[in-house]
């Protein structure tokens, strides 16, 4: 290992609890209600979201557009402009530390160092006027005490870890000279440059081809295993989640509607929405057969109906659905819980 | 079912790059390098490939938005001009924001000379009903609709002039999963009712598998495998088809625990490879692959399934 890498790990050790102690979640979002005030009202983007990511874990959030998955990710990094939102209740803790109360100066220290983020479109996330290498060394030097030369060596080693064939040449390239897959690898190198304890990946492979997507996901997993980084993957693609994540949260209209171990959620989905999502996938249907589409549309977050948000599209709706369902554990499946009055009890004998 | 609507014959398209001081191009981007294809009436032909393989240029050639630099596009229609319509990926940017929906939908017939407003409104109402839009929403503007509804508007517009062929360029990739299912179902039922011919361009193999009768796999501006969807997906004769399909994530199958390979890069189309286009990435290459490969039918003589690989009948490919 390079000396640069070691000094980095030591710097990081202060924030990661030593083995043997009860593990503190790297990310603990607790009952978060967040809204964006607009003219005469508010868009209620998050309605009681609770998400936990343990150290080294790979967790997915799936949902459609407007489900609040990206807001959750952006809020965890406090990347939403300060005066545009209102937190009604709830907290976000990063390794036990309340992110919502941290000052902007403290946040600048946490971002990129303790937690990093990868965005969907690497071209817009990288600075087009700076060479790739400079962007990586800037980040390293911002968060560590390495000299310029050491930072360069560290950056080139990082690029080599990304399975880039000629890292020295790429170090001196501009983002526009690189392909989409290569740019996303630069983003991953950037994200792992300070060995964060949490990486939030917001649709990291949506803009990539499937052949590249597979390699990027494998690369992410390989780096996360090596550095002990936890990953929170945000995506709309069920297949990617089932391939990559250990646990998954399904979000709908700003709430978590189902949560559990990925294989359980995919094989025995308990929430009617999750069932609808899986049933609507062309790969789950006979070619040419009609797909089971979920009727209707996502509710307007500025004007949510009372009770269960999925009520108007739900095939199972009944009496109790006028109350908002909490996440209820399923009796026979440890770790699997669902926010649905109708299926929480029924799933036991499906 | 089997009569031909359209034949593409050895279509080449190249774009000039970096002109010199006299205006002569110094380099070319070779987008399509000899595409041969026949489209049959009433079928759905899926075109699949990675970005940069020429899918969109092919769509442009079909719509005569791009003239082929070499090769011919032959329509079987005897009289009048061929009628092709397209549904684009992003309904947000493909609908005129300043026109009400009824005008958007009837724009193709307006261009063809139908200008009486009452007739156009009636026509729009009929089409809107077919695609599942409320008739009272026809006076609204595109921004008042959700993504799925906008895509329905785009489909209604494509139907307006009773086209011979509708090109669907990634029709569902901008949509959410639950809406994607609705749109796919709609496209199916419209095809049944009106005997439409679709050319479905997508990088999403699941959608292609679900919707197409035949499938064409494209790589670097060429078709490398062509045949009935079920046959192609089951036999995967061309090594590229194999690589592409293996990379498609499957529900419930974890990522392989092999080491990360160097990430494959699509070769540039500035300078075309000498031999088989797939040579650099191919795991099965051997002597003879340095020659250009042509699209050959398997088994020889039949025309249902064609592969551009001279090792397609090698032992390693059998039984798989």
Image (cartoon, rainbow, N blue to C red):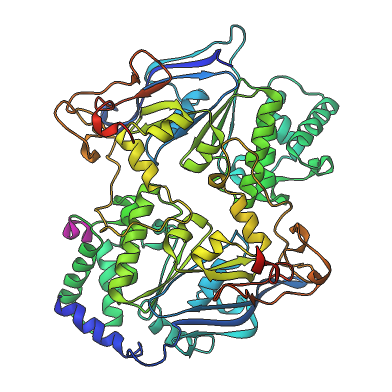
Q: Which is nearer the eye, A21 or A61?
A: A21
A257 lies above or below B153:
below
Query: Is B310 or A166 nearer to us in this picture?
Result: B310
Q: Where residue B56 sits in the image (x, y, percent)?
A: 45, 34
In the figure, residue B266 lies in which quadrant?
A: top left
Where residue A321 sits in the image (x, y, percent)? 79, 69
Q: Is residue A49 visible?
A: yes
Q: In the displayed structure, does residue A166 sit left or right of residue B120?
A: left
Res. B96 in view = no
The magenta-colored residue range is A166-172
Q: Position of residue B134 (x, y in %)?
A: 81, 42
The front one of B62 and B224 is: B224
- Residue B3 appears in which quarter of the rendering? top right
Quarter of the picture containing the N terminus of chain A is bottom left
Residue in the image at 78% along x and 60% along y = A312
Q: What residue is rendered at 43% in x and 59% in y?
A: A243
Measuring from the top left, give residue B47's x and y in whole percent: 46, 32
What is the number of callouts on the image? Answer: 0
Residue that sits furthest to the front in the current view: A349
Decide whether residue A170 is among the magenta residues: yes
């Amino acid at each position: 290992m390079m000396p640069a890498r070691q000094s980095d790990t030591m710097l990081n050790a202060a924030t990661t609890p030593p083995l043997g102690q009860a593990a503190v979640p790297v990310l603990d979002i607790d009952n978060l209600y967040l809204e964006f005030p607009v003219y005469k009202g508010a868009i209620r983007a998050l309605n009681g979201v609770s998400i936990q990511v343990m150290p080294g874990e790979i967790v997915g959030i799936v949902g459609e557009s407007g489900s609040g998955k990206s807001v959750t990710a952006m809020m965890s990094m406090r990347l939403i402009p300060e005066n545009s939102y209102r937190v009604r209740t709830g907290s976000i803790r990063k390794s036990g530390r309340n992110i919502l109360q941290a000052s902007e100066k403290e946040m600048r220290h946490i971002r990129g160092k303790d937690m990093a983020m990868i965005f969907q479109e690497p071209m817009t996330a990288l600075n087009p006027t700076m060479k790739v290498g400079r962007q990586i060394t800037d980040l390293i030097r911002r968060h560590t005490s390495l000299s310029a030369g050491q930072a360069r060596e560290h950056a080139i080693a990082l690029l080599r870890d990304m399975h880039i064939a000629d890292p020295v040449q790429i170090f001196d390239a501009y983002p526009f000279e690189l392909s989409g897959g290569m740019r996303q690898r630069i983003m991953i190198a950037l994200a792992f440059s300070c060995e964060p304890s949490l990486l939030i990946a917001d649709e990291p492979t949506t803009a990539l081809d499937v052949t590249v997507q597979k390699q990027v996901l494998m690369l992410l997993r390989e780096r996360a295993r090596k550095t002990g980084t936890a990953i929170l993957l945000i995506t709309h693609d069920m297949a990617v989640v089932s391939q990559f994540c250990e646990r998954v949260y399904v979000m709908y209209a700003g709430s978590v509607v189902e949560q559990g171990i990925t294989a359980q959620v995919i094989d025995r989905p308990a929430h009617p929405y999750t069932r609808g999502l899986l049933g609507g996938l062309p790969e789950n249907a006979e070619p040419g057969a009609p797909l089971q589409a979920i009727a209707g549309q996502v509710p307007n977050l500025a004007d949510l109906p009372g009770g269960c948000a999925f009520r108007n599209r739900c095939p199972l709706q009944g009496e109790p659905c006028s109350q908002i369902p909490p996440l209820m554990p399923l009796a026979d499946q440890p770790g699997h819980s669902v926010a649905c009055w109708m299926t929480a009890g029924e799933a036991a004998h499906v | 079912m089997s009569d031909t609507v359209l034949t593409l014959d050895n279509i080449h398209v190249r774009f000039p790059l970096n002109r010199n001081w006299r205006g002569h191009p110094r380099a070319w981007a070779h987008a399509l390098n000899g595409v041969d294809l026949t489209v049959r009436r009433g079928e759905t032909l899926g075109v699949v490939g990675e970005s940069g393989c020429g899918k969109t240029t092919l769509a442009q050639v079909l719509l005569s938005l791009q003239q082929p630099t070499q090769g011919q596009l032959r329509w079987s229609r005897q009289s009048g001009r061929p009628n092709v319509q397209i549904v684009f990926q992003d309904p947000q940017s493909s609908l005129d924001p300043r026109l009400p929906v009824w005008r958007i939908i009837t724009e193709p017939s307006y261009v063809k000379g139908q200008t009486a407003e009452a007739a156009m409104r009636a026509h729009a109402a009929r089409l809107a009903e077919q695609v599942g839009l409320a008739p009272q929403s026809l006076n609204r503007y595109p921004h008042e609709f959700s993504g799925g509804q906008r895509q329905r508007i785009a489909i209604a517009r494509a139907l307006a002039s009773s086209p011979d062929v509708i090109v669907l360029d990634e029709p569902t990739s901008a949509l959410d999963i639950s809406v994607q299912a609705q749109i796919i179902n709609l496209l199916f039922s419209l095809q049944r009712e009106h005997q439409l011919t679709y050319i479905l361009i997508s990088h999403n193999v699941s959608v292609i598998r679900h919707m197409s009768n035949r499938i064409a796999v494209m790589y670097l501006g060429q078709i490398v495998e062509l045949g009935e969807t079920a046959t192609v997906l089951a036999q995967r004769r061309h090594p590229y088809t194999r690589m592409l399909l293996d990379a498609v994530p499957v529900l419930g199958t974890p990522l392989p625990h092999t080491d990360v390979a160097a990430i494959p890069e699509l070769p540039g189309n500035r300078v075309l490879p000498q031999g088989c286009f797939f040579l650099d990435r191919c795991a099965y290459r051997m002597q003879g692959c340095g020659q250009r490969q042509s699209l050959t039918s398997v088994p020889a003589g039949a025309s249902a399934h064609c592969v551009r690989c001279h090792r397609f009948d090698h032992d390693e490919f059998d039984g798989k």
